[in-house]
Image (cartoon, rainbow, N blue to C red):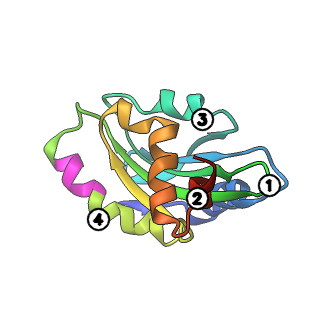
Amino acid sequence: MATQIDKEACREAYNQVRDDNTDITWAVFKYEGARILPGGQGADYEDFKSMCTDDARLFAFVRITMGDAMSKRAKFTFITWMGENIGVLQRAKISTDKALVKEIVQNFAKEFMFSDPRELDADNIRTELKKAGGANYDAQTE
């Protein structure tokens, strides 16, 4: 059975993360049978990380605040999570289903695919976003 996505509900969750006037910094898109639906959102990154369990497969859109005291800016990342206990068929399907989610989640600086909880460390993601961001003016203070 082909996977379907609730485009309207997922787009609403995506837009809330992008909105500077909300505290929402992440949104998760999860499987419910053969459908992909919003699976949660929030302001605490640790709450997002707790959803990334060994038996979960999900997509996430995350806002990370970058910069220094003089200049803060939001950077966005797209994360595909596949827990260690996900079967081979589900692993294969997630790569094709990712295209459905990317029809909605289009603006992000860097994409990640993780299966180890240690990779979800916010500092790890920040470091990778800095590398992807071009000029790094933080080096002047190091």
Q: Which residue is the site of mark 3?
A: 45
| Of callouts 4 and 3, the N-terminal one | 3
- In three-dimensional space, the C-alpha distance between marks 3 and 2, rounded to whole angstroms, equals 13 Å
**x 45%, y 60%: residue:** 131
- Judged by depth in the image, the label closer to the viewer, 1 or 4, is 1
Q: Please state, as top left, top right, bottom left or bottom right, where the N terminus lies in the image.
A: bottom left
Q: Position of residue 92 (x, y in %)?
A: 19, 55
Evaluate whether residue 24 shows in this view: yes
Indicate the amino acid at tag 2: Phe
Q: Position of residue 128 (x, y in %)?
A: 44, 53
Q: Residues within 10 Å of mark 2 (few under 14, many from 20)?
A: many
Q: Which residue is the site of mark 1?
A: 70
- In three-dimensional space, the C-alpha distance between marks 4 and 3, rounded to whole angstroms, equals 27 Å
- Mostly what secondary structure, the magenta segment? helix
- Judged by depth in the image, the label closer to the viewer, 4 or 2, is 2
Mark on residue 76? 2
Which stretch is magenta?
89-94
- Answer yes or no: do the residues labelled 1 and 3 have beta carbons within 8 Å? no
